[in-house]
Amino acid sequence: MTQPLFYVSPEQQIKDRAEFARAGIARGRSALVLRYADGIVFVAENRSQTLHKVAEIYDRIGFAAVGRYNEFDNLRIAGIRHADVRGYTYDRRDVTGRMLANAYAQVLGTIFSTVTEKPYEVELAVAEVGATAAQDQIYRLTFDGSVADETEFCVMGGSAEAVTAALRENYDPAHRLGRALSLAIEALSADNDGQSPAVEALEVAVLDRTRRLPRKFRRLTADGITEALATPVKKPRARAKA
Amino acid sequence: MTTDFLLPQTQRTPLGELLPERTSSFTEFLARSQPGLLPAAGRANVPAQELSPQATTIVAVTTATGVVLAGDRRATMGSMIAQRDIHKVFAADEYSAIGIAGSAGLAVDLVKLFRVELEHYEKIEGSPLSLDGKANRLAAMIRGNLGLALQGFVVIPLFVGWDTEISCGRIFSYDATGGCYEETGYHSVGSGSLFARGALKKLYRPDFTMTKGVTACIQALFDAADDDSATGGPDLARQIFPVVITVDAQGVDVLAEADVAKITNQVVASRQRRPGGPEAKL
């Protein structure tokens, strides 16, 4: 390896790398993860029916990502492997969202600070549905490995700020699925020149704590989304304490 | 537990090793990354019977709308009853179930690995394996146990499932070398299987309803327990009944104990009138 010709300060290096990653992420469309009365719903704008941005990791854990597909798909597979090995070695109950978020933070942080590699242009959310609403957890991870624990919802992608602002107005974690979904779709219009995305262009999945089987992750088809949106909106229950 | 394999593709970290030979098989991945966790990774030089209890009879019957799998609750070590309420049939995933006979310790571990294997594939690929794919995968896992089987630690599964492509219930049986054979109508494995299979031969009808299929399985297990000391009959004093799983288009369902108890009580009552079981017409 040849010696670099010019000195670049570490501050400048980090700044350049962060800018590079941000620009990559900003090119993609947004994804949302939000709590609703019976669990957590993932909504992503995605025109492909097979290249998923939202995925199942474990019994109670789901994953959503924006950015470069090959990069976050590698992270998805690594996450599934990590969770399955942990659950097989100990017990299924010992696989937690926090553990997975920490593992991802390690990986992303290492890649970001390894000078020989380009940073990953991805943003992730890891969500775990609990037995009660108070135990639900959403972690948001950025390209540099920082983790944030989100109490209600998290928005990822280039227009995250605009979408967050739009969603915050009417959002309540005690909303039913239909209401939460329609709010999310409305908020996504901030990413789309004021136009709400069509149902067919959405990828939606839920972690439904009322599901009888141990695996709580379930994808919603276009029909399923339409049906959920059509269910009459009930008055939200008293706002759950975080 | 290390998070090594979550780390990036650099010279020192193994994610680089992971990616080129990307596999959807949990077993293969485990064999590569942490082989010590796999069942049967060791060898033993003592008689098999003294190390692990033996799980005994499993029966399966197809019905018009699906398939039924049932197992008795006894595990034995030699002539001693090691456990009277062991579980030997399990849901493998949402459309299949597995029952095991043979060396209980290895068998339970094998089922655990098989369940993760199916789920792992489904999560990574985004769609489940076909029923034949699941059956073949199980065959490979049994073959992997051949070394221990030769020392007496034989594990024989019975695999059933709903084939979503052709909409019917199917049964697969295995031998210790990993041979996989599809069975028509009904099958049984384990020490009491001779008697259970004889009973099913007389009781089986292709147009069984689910309830009749369940009753036939419980009758067959009763016959197995009647003539095989290693198979446990229904224990009315302790309220221990067979474990019964049904699989149909709606998916897999472990029958509630109350439902199994009801059918078992009917079977026991009819046996008090006629100990040999229902009469087959000549």
Image (tube, coloured by chain):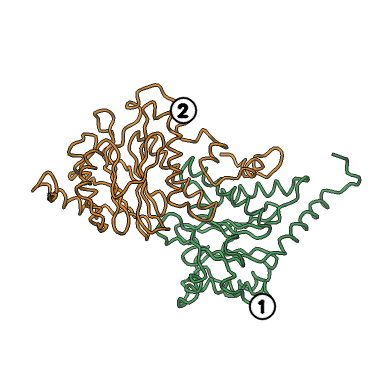
Image quadrant in which you'd find residue B14: top right
Give the number of the disc on residue B42: 2
Image quadrant in which you'd find residue A142: bottom right
Q: Residue at x 61, y 72 (%)?
A: A167
The picture's colour for chain B is: orange
Q: Residues within 10 Å of mark 1 (few under 14, many from 20)?
A: few
Tell me: B220 left or right of B162: left
Q: Which residue is mark 1?
A: A194
Amino acid under label 1? Gly
The picture's colour for chain A is: green
Chain letter for mark 2, please.
Answer: B
Amino acid under label 2? Gly
Rendered position, B240 above or below A161: above
- The percent position of residue B268, horizontal first and vertical second, equals 15, 48
Chain letter for mark 1, please.
Answer: A
Q: Residue at x 55, y 41 (%)?
A: B29
